[in-house]
Amino acid sequence: MTVSATAIAEVLPLEEPARAIRDSRPLRLITCGSVDDGKSTLIGRLLWDTKAVKEDQAATLQRDSSGKQNDLGLPDFALLLDGLQAEREQGITIDVAYRYFSTDRRSFIVADTPGHEQYTRNMATGASTADLAVLLVDARAGILEQTRRHATIASLMGIRQFVLAVNKIDLTDYDRARFEQITHEFKEFALTLGVKQITAIPMSALKGENVVYDGRAAMPWYEGPTLVETLEKATTRSNQTVGFRLPVQRVSRPGESFRGYQGTVAGGSVKPGDSVVILPSGMVANVTKIVTFDLVRNAAVAGDAITLVLDRQVDVSRGDMIVAIDSQPMTGRGFDAQLVALQAEGIEPGKRYWLKSGSRRQRVSIDPISQLDLKTSKWNAADRLGMNAIGKVHLTFDEQAIFDTYEQNRTTGAFILIDPDTNNTVAGGMITGRRSELGGIHKDDQRVLLSLPADLAEKLMATELFANRRQDVEVRHTSAGRAAEILADLDE
Amino acid sequence: MSDIRHEAEAKQNAPHKPPLDPHLKALENEAIHIFREVAAEFERPVMLYSVGKDSSVLLHLARKAFYPGRVPFPLLHVNTGWKFREMIAFRDKVVADYDLDLIEYVNPRGASENVTPFTHGSSRYTDIMKTEALRNALDAGKYDAAFGGARRDEEASRAKERIYSFRTPDHRWDPRNQRPELWNVYNGMIRQGESVRAFPLSNWTEVDIWRYIQAEDIPIVPLYFAEKRPFVERDGMMILAEDPRLELLPGEVRQEGIIRFRTLGCFPLTGAIRSEATTLDDIIAELETATVSERQGRAIDRDQSGSMEKKKREGYF
């Protein structure tokens, strides 16, 4: 018993997976991996073993795979997922597909994204709504550049829960040391992204080991959860703990006596009697009623689609935001953001786009500042962004804009850019902060050098705030004497 | 206004309904958000209403989304002339009860060229009486957005469809060139003549639909419940035999049995299943142990792999 307990301690993830919660909202997840990591097989296996595939679909599958069966006599799972004819013909996944399965405890929405070249835009699309990312690696190949890219994109899009699925473990003869080596390598890398919640699972998707059913027979050394057990315990994102936000979608005026503001609560909660501010006008009012079809409610929380009635005649229209008086978002004409360029034409400097965030659409001009090199995780200066590029940009608006940071609120901090020439969606963006016009310590290219004792620096670097902006920081270790010299040089 | 007040008062007095579970609540919230967004962004929205269970859920969500106001767009029913009689009776009652605007469209070629599922084959009949009819009806109304009840779990090509699915002026869907859709921020910008099909039920599964119908007490066509009904067996399907236009082929016999329908379309193309499910509880229990998908009863999906994708590219819903 003592022996095996020691073994568990070595294999289990550093962080315990999140506690099981009695919250049965669907968990949204994204699967990513390189072309040959067996992603379609994994999802096919999930659908198959949770009985989400019915007999007639399986029969079509058998017919389509025309003898192309694996050695277990199961159909070619990839055909189940690659729904478009061109995909079946070419044997590739072109676009994000959404799949649904459920267990007794929870239901799941899987965004299955392609693993080949155009990965970034499809991944960003799938990741934008995901609570958790499953990163697939081939146990023989280990962590690839592609794995690092996918993890980087997922974390930029705000995903904080990862499953590292070490697949094809059967082809390494269930080599435990290999599994642990891959896990260790990934965790080291993930720490630089500020990602701490990682569950590593050795699995064979083809044989169905540690996907839905455990693989104890083949891997007695692994006593951690299966993939499905991990997914059942994962947490769904929530904007409930931040300030109240209601982006107004439409004004309901069925008659003279009723005027309500309809929208989906994007943050916090609200109840009758609360004082609110309407942005951008800044007018103040109190909530009198929360109207829904079923009953007049005494509270609404993030995620609820509601109709809000205020106690006085104020000018509110679509695109405005009704917010908590004591916890307001940022307003201004200049913001900083990170964005993912989604189309071939990229993002051109100075071009005026439409920006849509929540229900608000306004003109914006974009100035690219830097681009993330996914190989080195470094931000290099850039003045335009090509397709699939991840960049930092300045946003300049003609009129007041209203945002939270994406870190604080994944709804009021997110936006898309629309090219007015094509009407196509050309970028997805995440607000990182408001740009101050005052200069001083906040001025764009100003830096601050701190000289700290190493233990204090380590504590600071472990904070979430720091980890989230890790890429903005340069860190060097040196002696106290040398640090003093450098600072003295600067003063001259 | 008096109707609205009346409804509100009736609700206050209605017996207390337990709150939706968080799963259905999340799906409902998402659908309402989509309804409101489309209604606000487009000039002439319309809701495709097929009278089936998904349409019933879609309509219920639309009423919730715009309450206490009326549903701010008309319902469009593309009638082939070959729907189940009970569907039409149900439709007319719903429209009257909920004070809705209904537009019914029947492709005149049906009458002028005598297009029927028996004479033209299921594929060609569907092309003319459903796909072409839908395109004509949308053009006639100059609708720039059309709500549909399609779900991504129904069929492989649907799994790739966006919530705002862009269509060219001739109603074509280009699956290889769809607009990326991030978060719940939808791009509703289109040019003159272009349109969007909007799918508020994208993330719902068949079980979700039934559980929601049960939780919200939504009326549905009685054909979904098992009952003793007349049928004939044809091409491996049990076809309801109550319409005088159904002529028995040599060797076919009119039978009776306890049957029900899992989906509803045109009666000659929709197969019944043998089932004892007479309540929603029964249906849900049956579904949870079902081993075939719901579209198995639809003749039009069986022609070939990818047949749904082909129909969709041409403008089918």
Image (cartoon, helix red, strand yellow):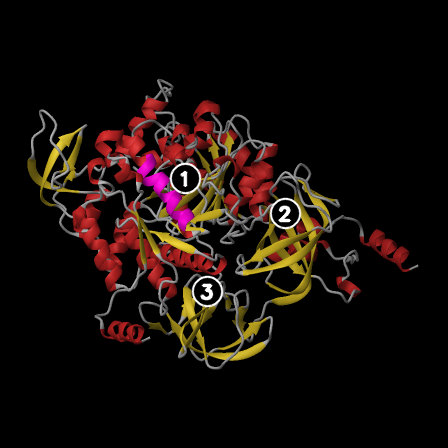
Q: Chain of mark 3?
A: A
Q: Callout 2, which amino acid?
A: Asp
Pointer 3 with pointer 2, Cβ within 8 A:
no
Residue bearing the label numbered 2: A421
Q: Is residue A210 visible?
A: no
In the picture provided, is A458 more to the left or to the right than B2? right
Q: Which residue is mark 1?
A: B315
Crowd band around label 1 with a 10 angstrom C-alpha radius: few (<14), some (14–19), many (20+):
many
Question: What stretch of residues is rendered in magenta?
Answer: B127-140
Q: Quadrant of the C terminus of chain A?
A: bottom right
Q: Is residue B128 magenta?
A: yes
Location of residue B300 by image quarter: top left
Q: Amino acid at mark 1?
A: Gly
Residue positioned 39% across, 62% down in the render? B72
Q: Between label 1 and label 3, give the one nearer the viewer.
A: 1
CB contact under 8 Å: marks 1 and 2: no
Say if mark 1 contacts mark 3, CB within 8 Å. Answer: no
**Disc number placed over residue A263 in the picture, else none:** 3
Predominant SS of the magenta segment = helix
Q: Position of residue A160 (x, y in %)?
A: 53, 50
Q: Which element type, helix, strand or loop, lies under badge 2? A: loop
Residue at 46% x, 51% y: name it: B144
Judge the density around disc 3: few (<14), some (14-19), many (≥20) Cα neighbours within 10 Å: many
In whole angstroms, how far apart are the C-alphas of marks 1 and 3?
31 Å
**For the residues tagged 1 and 3, is the chain the same?**
no
Q: Have a look at marks 1 and 2 and say if they share a chain.
A: no
